[in-house]
């Protein structure tokens, strides 16, 4: 019975640590969202009230959490363990302007990537030896 109590104490400590990390991330996200909202308001010559900024930051945080869950589900549905750009584009299907911007961004990224050669599947050693003997015969 003491082992169960010890394990539950360890689990409680891990849960508290996870909660504190989540709280820290949430607070940093909100601060960033507030900073962005205030900068945009200033740039556009507008004033924005604190309750509105707080509301915007809370909505953005909740939206980001839901988006992360959706992206994870899209990747899982496709049989992958990680999210890729296509998942992000699919998540924007209700907002055609955003989806078009994401596609454009994806295409720009692809254009900047160096063109790499296709990866060759490894053949059997028998095939490698046959290829090597042909190369040697051609050279001779």
Image (cartoon, rainbow, N blue to C red):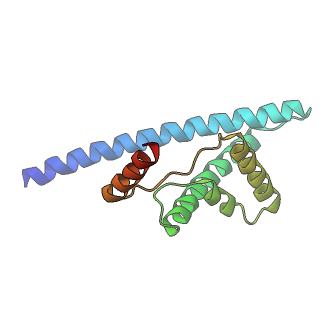
Farthest residue to the front: give it.
Answer: 140
Farthest residue to the bottom: give it.
Answer: 77
* Residue toward you, 44 or 113: 113
Is 99 on the left or on the right of 27, as rendered?
A: right
- Please state the horizontal and vertical placement of residue 112, each as a whole percent of the image: 71, 39
* Residue toward you, 64 or 34: 64
Which residue is drawn at the image coordinates 37% and 51% (left, top)?
Answer: 133
Is 69 on the left or on the right of 96, as rendered?
A: left
Farthest residue to the right: give it.
Answer: 45
* Residue toward you, 52 or 69: 69
Residue 93 is drawn in which quadrant?
bottom right
- Please state the horizontal and vertical placement of residue 33, each as a whole percent of the image: 68, 39
Q: Quadrant of the N terminus?
A: bottom left
Which residue is drawn at the image coordinates 49% and 54% (left, top)?
Answer: 82
- Please state the horizontal and vertical placement of residue 138, each as a whole percent of the image: 46, 48
- Please state the horizontal and vertical placement of residue 36, each as a whole percent of the image: 74, 35
Q: Quadrant of the C terminus?
A: top left
Count of all numbered marks drawn on residues in the image:
0
Residue 44 is drawn in which quadrant?
top right
Is 16 on the left or on the right of 24, as rendered?
A: left
Residue 70 is drawn in which quadrant?
bottom right
């Amino acid at each position: 019975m003491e082992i169960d109590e010890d394990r539950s104490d360890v689990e409680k400590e891990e849960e508290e640590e996870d909660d504190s990390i989540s709280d820290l991330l949430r607070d940093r996200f909100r601060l960033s969202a507030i900073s962005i909202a205030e900068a945009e308001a200033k740039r556009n010559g507008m004033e924005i009230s604190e309750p509105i900024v707080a509301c915007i930051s809370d909505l953005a945080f909740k939206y980001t959490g839901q988006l992360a869950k959706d992206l994870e589900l899209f990747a899982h549905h496709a049989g992958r363990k990680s999210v890729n750009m296509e998942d992000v584009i699919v998540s924007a299907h209700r907002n055609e302007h955003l989806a078009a911007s994401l596609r454009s961004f994806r295409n720009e990224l692809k254009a900047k990537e160096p063109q790499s050669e296709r990866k060759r599947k490894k053949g059997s050693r028998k095939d490698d030896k046959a290829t090597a003997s042909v190369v040697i015969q051609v050279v001779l």
